Amino acid sequence: MPSWFSSNDKTNPDGEPTTDTATHEHSPIRHGDNHLDLAKESLSQLLNDERVPASVRSGLQHEYQRIRQMLDKLEQGQLHIAVFGRVSVGKSSVLNALIGHEAFSVSLLHGETKTADMEAWQEVDAGGVYLIDTPGINEIDGESREALAHEVANRADLLLFVVDSDLTDVELKALHTVAETKRPIILVVNKADQYNDKQKLELRAIIRDRVGGIIAPENIVFTAASPGMQIIIREDEFGNEHESTRQRPVDIINLKTRLWDIIEAEGKTLSALNASLFAGNLSEQVGERMLEVRKEIGERIIHIYCMGKGVAVALNPIPIADLVAAAAIDVGMIIHLSRIYGLPMSKTEAGELIKSIAAQMVLLYGSFWAVNLASSALKISTVGLSTVLTGAAQGAIAWYSTLVIGRAAENYLAKGKSWGDSGPKLAVAEILDSLDRDSVMKEAKEEIMMYLKQGKK
């Protein structure tokens, strides 16, 4: 276990372990322990949640594998630092300078780094810290490489965003994108050997203004990871000038110091933050997939009840009985849907929800529902012996009403038995607007007539 990841235990002069109770409770390490425990618990709950259907797990197989990897990472006390930037700003050189040898490929050819490479930072007490190189953000085939960079950013605990001057529009856009992952970022201004002290101050001020709100001033660090040659001119005793060159020293100390300050103070918290963010994102994905599955099942259930109600209304010769049968079918549908969404409702609750939806339907589309009464009157005029055509027409209206009620109920259940801020009127209005009434009625009528004709054979 790396030292930065270990507990806050101390030893007395006799070499026996002691604990500083005055500071231990409120120390960053103790808080880091708490954060890690919570993160591990969140990941374990996601991994072992029996409520998640097998189909959802299968669709998110890669993400569930990442949970196992992240739990292993937390157990081993690993911290991952990823680097981003344009081609040729010296991303790989910065990492090589930190490591102390050429572990990452450095090439004049653009696109040399095509995949995410990872190396351990073999410093004193740096066990468990890994550095990750990524492709340039402006390379050819940028979409796939940007997707890779975004994926690595989501896995990393800390990000280094490398530039070599004031940020270009491409860099600023990429910085905003990476910042959306909520990981802490250090902005590394590389090739600082190209600027004198005054120019560095001016450049720092410009960059600080451009990245304000994204990066804290103390996290803007200048480096010279692979400095150029320095020209030296010497004058001999005869006044003759002699030109020579020498290699400028690598200047990475400010970045290394800032990294260590962060790692020692917040290393555990960063690991926990990354795990918690991943758990939160995966929870959203699982929720969305489960909602998709429920909607697919819900659509099939609604169609079954639409057919049942349409046929029942078409066959029933007594108009008043139509209403009783229709209400019973709608109540049954909502109870069925509520179980699918894991929010079981009683008959009374289902009835109240139907009343609420129906009230909005009448307010928004009142004249249309008068057709249902006209059709019922037609049944009375024919002494209840309506034709297949008349029954199918009224059944299609019943079908349509159940479809709207079912869709509205799904909306209500998907939001946890709530209409949200918009309320039921807007929710029902959006559903009515999304449906092509004439097409739905035509298809419903055809299905009902086909069913009725088959029943007479």
Image: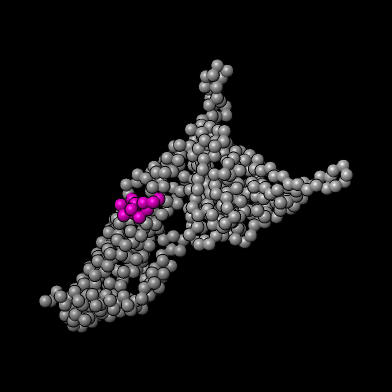
Q: Horizontal placement of 80 versus 364: left or right?
A: right
Q: In the figure, 146 relative to 222: above or below?
A: below
Q: Position of residue 406 (x, y in %)?
A: 32, 65
Q: Position of residue 81 (x, y in %)?
A: 54, 45
In front here: 20 or 253? 253
Q: Quarter of the image holding residue 258? A: top right
Q: Position of residue 196 (x, y in %)?
A: 75, 49
Based on the picture, tell me whether residue 56 belongs to the magenta stretch: yes
Q: Quarter of the image holding residue 373? A: bottom left
In front here: 138 or 220? 138
Based on the picture, tell me whether residue 218 belongs to the magenta stretch: no
Q: Horizontal placement of 158 versus 302: left or right?
A: right
Determine the residue positioned at 51% across, 58% down. Answer: 146
Q: Residue furthest top?
A: 14
Q: Which range of residues does the magenta coloring cover?
A: 52-63
Q: Is residue 19 visible?
A: yes
In front here: 443 or 393? 443
Determine the residue positioned at 42% across, 53% down. Answer: 284
Determine the residue positioned at 68% across, 42% down. Answer: 249
Q: Residue furthest right?
A: 238
- Mainly helix, strand or loop, the magenta region? helix
Q: In the figure, 450 relative to 158: above or below?
A: below
Q: Residue furthest bottom?
A: 381
Q: Position of residue 395 (x, y in %)?
A: 24, 75
Q: Is residue 352 visible?
A: no
Determine the residue positioned at 42% across, 44% down. Answer: 69
* Quadrant of the drawing holding the C terminus: bottom left
In front here: 395 or 27? 27
